[in-house]
């Protein structure tokens, strides 16, 4: 069968109607979900953007040994394995980070198209004055925003937006390639990642009459630098991007239907992580301030992700299994009848897609790379059936490390020499994670810590990284 994988970057799970949202319009993705196996407990693994793609294309928990880095030559990657089984593979993306700077995540694909100019990518050099849409103090990367505005200066119509260009390119590819005996199409759009600047009609749908500054790429920091009206508008900007993504993914889905491919094609939709819009007092997905540059805790808004898989002819039901991005490569290979390369950490979800009651794992793990030790206040989120344990390892921030783990910009993790505590939440009774039960339920936390250490050992994690995770 054919396989189409759609990744939409920074797409919050709770902004989709199929996951309970009632204020944002996502009719096309909701329709796809109705015919899909919807995974209610899918969690990000390696965090953020590039580490996630590293997981997707290798089926491994790469945060245990890798980081935001080029794809190593010795990794066994999904399109290469599919190619040995006779699949034609194509990668179409406007997400820049896994393709630029020699990162080579196109390796193994028979063809690839990169839609240029997203975010702060080095693209346009035309000299003209750039007017920022708000005070630079409210922007995470003012110079990067200026670069983005240069890159998009010639945009005139909705069809010129990046998600539109990417889905249109995928549609054109299908029109010329749908007769292949079997194909793998991987479509990766950066939207709704910031900068958030969808066409005005999308924004006005969610915040009509707003007159203030447009904070299209907010600073990653405690959210109190934004007024209540600005925060509401930021949420509307993001909601507008979500609806725009839904519209253009819907165009691709319509073409799949027009070409009669749904009866012989698996369609997968997912993301890499979410984003804080004021929850837990935070804006962003990490913390980048003058006094501290490092990681934020990975709560549900960031770690809990959408994932649904439509099998040929559709079979709509929901699964409560704990699943993660490293599971997608083994799933795709089994669906394709390809040989297991013996390198993957993930588990095939095919039994779940058949409706079988199969236990995949006891807990999911969401984490930035381990290779910098505790620099930057590294914390790992361990999610079981009931509990979310945000584990600070040794709890002491020490040393420094340079990372590109925030949108590809080199950043020195600052060490404050202060402790960061563990957090434990009972998700059924406290889904908003407002009451930290760690002081009262250290026994639960210790049990999860022990199992997590065993998990790291089973993956062959080096002792120099493991030593931070051997105690509370």
Image: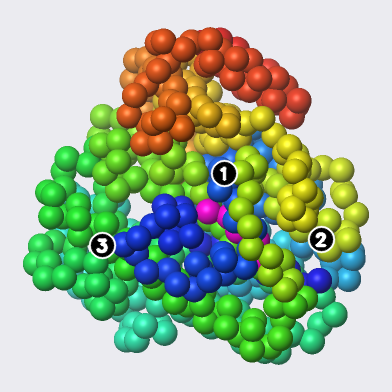
Residue drawn at x 68%, y 25% as measured from the top left: 456
Q: Is residue 166 found inside the magenta-colored segment of the image? A: no
Q: Which label sits on residue 236?
A: 3
Q: Is residue 308 found inside the magenta-colored segment of the image? A: yes
Q: Which residues are magenta?
A: 306-310
C-alpha distance separating marks 2 and 1:
21 Å
Q: Which residue is mark 1?
A: 41
Q: Which residue is mark 2?
A: 335
Q: Position of residue 467 (x, y in %)?
A: 61, 14
Local secondary structure at mark 1: strand
Q: Position of residue 25 (x, y in %)?
A: 37, 69
Question: Which of 43 and 198 lies nearest the eye of the viewer?
Answer: 43
Image quadrant occupied by the N terminus = bottom right
Can residue 378 be seen here? no
Residue drawn at x 68%, y 88% as measured from the top left: 259
Q: Hey, which quadrant is residue 345 in on the image?
A: top right
Q: How is the image coloured?
A: rainbow
């Amino acid at each position: 069968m054919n396989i189409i994988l759609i990744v939409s970057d920074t797409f919050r799970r709770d902004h989709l109607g199929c996951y309970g949202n009632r204020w944002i319009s996502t009719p096309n993705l909701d329709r796809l979900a109705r015919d899909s196996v919807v995974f209610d407990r899918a969690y990000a693994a390696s965090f953020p953007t590039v580490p996630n793609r590293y997981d997707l294309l290798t089926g491994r928990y790469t945060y245990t040994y890798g980081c935001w880095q080029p794809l190593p030559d010795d990794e066994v990657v999904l399109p290469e394995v599919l190619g040995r089984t006779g699949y034609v593979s194509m990668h179409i993306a406007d997400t820049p980070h896994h393709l630029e700077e020699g990162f080579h995540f196109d390796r193994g694909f028979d063809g690839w198209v990169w839609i240029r100019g997203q975010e702060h990518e080095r693209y346009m050099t035309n000299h003209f004055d750039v007017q920022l849409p708000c005070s630079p103090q409210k922007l995470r990367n003012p110079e990067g925003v200026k670069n983005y505005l240069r890159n998009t200066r010639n945009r005139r119509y909705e069809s010129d937006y990046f998600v539109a260009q990417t889905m249109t390119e995928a549609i054109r590819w299908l029109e010329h390639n749908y007769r292949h005996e079997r194909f793998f199409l991987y479509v990766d759009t950066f939207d709704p990642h910031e900068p958030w600047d969808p066409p005005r009609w999308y924004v006005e749908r969610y915040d009509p009459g707003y007159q203030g500054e447009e904070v299209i790429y907010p600073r990653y920091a405690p959210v109190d630098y934004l007024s209540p009206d600005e925060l509401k508008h930021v949420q509307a900007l993001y909601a507008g991007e979500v609806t725009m993504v839904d519209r253009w993914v819907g165009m691709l889905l319509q073409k799949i239907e027009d070409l009669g491919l749904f009866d012989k094609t698996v369609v997968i939709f997912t993301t890499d992580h979410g984003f804080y819009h004021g929850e837990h007092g935070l804006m962003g997905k990490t913390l980048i301030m003058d006094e501290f540059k490092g990681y934020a805790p990975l709560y549900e808004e960031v770690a809990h992700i959408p994932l649904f898989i439509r099998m040929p002819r559709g079979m709509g039901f929901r699964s409560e299994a704990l699943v993660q991005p490293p599971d997608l490569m083994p799933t795709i290979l089994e669906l394709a009848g390809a040989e297991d390369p013996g390198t993957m950490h993930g588990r095939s979800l095919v039994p779940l897609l058949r409706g079988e009651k199969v236990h995949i794992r006891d807990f999911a793990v969401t984490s930035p790379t381990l290779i910098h030790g505790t620099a930057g206040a590294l914390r790992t989120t361990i999610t079981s059936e009931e509990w979310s344990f945000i584990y600070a390892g040794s709890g002491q921030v020490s040393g420094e490390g340079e990372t590109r783990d925030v949108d590809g910009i080199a950043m020195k993790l600052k060490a404050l020499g202060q402790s960061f505590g563990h957090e434990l939440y009972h998700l059924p009774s406290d889904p908003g994670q407002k009451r930290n039960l760690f002081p009262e339920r250290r026994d639960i936390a210790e049990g999860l810590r022990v199992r997590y250490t065993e998990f790291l050992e089973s993956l062959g994690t080096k002792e120099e990284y493991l030593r931070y995770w051997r105690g509370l």
